[in-house]
Amino acid sequence: MNCTTLLRLRYYTTYHLNQRILQLKNASGPTKVDDALQLFDEMLQRQPPPSIFQFTKLISVIVKMKQYSTALMLIKQMKLMGIPANIYIINISINCHCRLNQVAYGFTLLATIFKQGHPPNLATYSTLIHGLVLADRVFEAVELFKKLLREKVCEPDQITFGIVINGLCKVGHTSKALELLRYMESGSCKPDVVQYSAVIDSLCKDRMVDNALELFSHMTEKGVLANIIAYNALIQGLCNFGRETEAAKILMGMEEKGISPGVDTFTILVDSFCKKGCVKDAELAVQAMVRRGLHPNVITYSALIDGYCLRGEIEEAENVIDRMMEQDIVPNIITYSILINGYCKKKQIDKARHLFQEIQDKGLIPDVITYNIMLQGLFLSGHPATAIELFNKMQETGQAPNIYTYRILLHGMCKNSQCYDALALFRSLESKELMEDVGLYSILIDGYSKCGKHDLAMDLFDELCVKGLKPNVRTYTVMISVLCQQGLLGKAKDLLRKMDENGCLPDSVTYNVIVQEFLKEKAFQEAEILLEEMISRGFSTDSTTFEMLLNQIPSTGQDSPMQTIIQKLINIK
DNA sequence: TGACACCTCA
């Protein structure tokens, strides 16, 4: 064999190998990891061994599959075979350790490579910063980032900035993220649509949708073209605050700009309309997407089913399943869970149980949420014994109960006059997460107070405080109600003030509970103060409170403050 | 895409 032939052969095998790695990268299926491992073994045995580039590529594929321990093992094997690591391999290695919650080890590697004379590059630092973010150590991530800038270690790129911006958004420091975005604008590494979208999304989650809209137009003015991700974030943000009409306008606006909304964009709208109870509008959105040649998927239809169920229109929900079948869209466990939930809420427990069985016969495996839905349904329909049976069965089938399961269980038991059993079950729990769950405490306090055991309810409240747990709105509301039932209105009011001081704002339920009690006691002045306060905080009365107020008109006279309050309430409604 | 606990019982 002459030299040219040898080169050609080498070129051919390299090309062939690259093709196989590429195929693997785009493959999907259960054997993907095994195939990758097999290829790796094959590569190790080759003589001469393939280049480090190919090993790097293959290991990257494995990292993309989130098989971090495997990737690390392979890197170790390469080392044993005498294939020297390069900075790429080292960076991959650091990344894997970070993903496995071992940032500290990542930093150890950094020290090692320094010693070995491999200079770390920007990717090394970005990986470590990302590692800190993943470990919720965002503050340290920012510090490291600042250090890079300050000491001019290397020039951060969009990826580095993106990691830090995402980290800041993740911990709710959106304004800091925004600052960093401005900093980028002023420097040479300009932000692109990805960094803008992250901040837009974060602003939406902070309820600052208008600021998000502003940033969106600012981005456009800067000449950065919005993509579908930015639009979806904005549309989702608007929908979350009931601004579906604006969201729909944005959607149409994006089409005018030549960016086609996707199935998921429309699905955000469909879901939002459904949650609002406007299934008609949701159906219109479905029609609009179909007109554009987009096919609603299982998520879209599941949202619709939920919408119909929420309105109690079970038959319509069932029809959606048929519509899906006609289009060969296979309902999944979530779709069925939503429908089962619909049945349960309508107390059609037999239908729920039937469907629950039917899907299992089809081979679908109910998950925790499906079981939770069924449990709640059984309790609601007055079948506590069957519920307990199912609770045992779910554990036998390997579905571990979660915190929701226990809340449903304890609540169901209390409602079915099994308070003592509920407490006994609670006492038998061994997980810290469950023992320290204020939700479970609230349920038990509520349960005990409703069966007249006020002193036990109070004891439980003291217990959770002694444990150092923070009561939430519901806990406080339940306790306020307990105090009122014992005629301790003054103490109830003290607790209302105390929750405020503890940074737990009362909600409309809290106010309605306490106002009603004051009205019952004809303590109108107190009631007035609280009503003014609740109105100023943007809450309104429920129908019962409002009716009670109207009944006071004859006894309070024409120009009483109560009249003014009633007028205000009418204006709100 | 799906699940939980606070009010309204005359």
Image (cartoon, coloured by chain):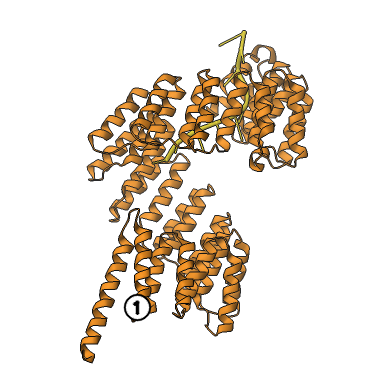
Chain colours: A orange, B yellow
Residue at 63% x, 35% y: name it.
Answer: A439
**Residue at the spot 68% in from the left edge and 18% down from the top edge:** A451
When the figure is inspected, residue A219 is found, relative to residue A449, above or below; the finding is: below
Task: Report x, y in % for residue A244.
Answer: 40, 40
Callout 1 crowding tier (Cα within 10 Å): few <14, some 14–19, many ≥20 = some
Instruction: Give SS at disc 1.
Output: loop
Residue sitting nearer the eye, A279 or A223: A279
Any part of residue A44 in sight = yes
Residue A458 lies left or right of residue A281; in this view the side is right
Residue A310 seen in render: no
In the picture as drawn, the residue positioned furthest to the bottom comes out as A2
Query: Viewer-proximal residue, A401 or A452?
Result: A401
Q: Quadrant of the N terminus of chain A?
A: bottom left
**Would you say A154 lies left or right of A53 here?**
right
Direction from residue A80 to residue A473 in the image, left or right: right
Q: Position of residue A31 (x, y in %)?
A: 34, 56
Q: Is residue A48 above or below residue A434?
A: below
Task: Identify the image quadrant of residue A427.
Answer: top right
Percent x, y for residue A108?
A: 60, 73
> Closest to the observer: A437 or A308?
A437
Compared to residue A33, the image places residue A351 above or below, namely above
Residue named by callout 1: A50
- Amino acid, disc 1: Pro
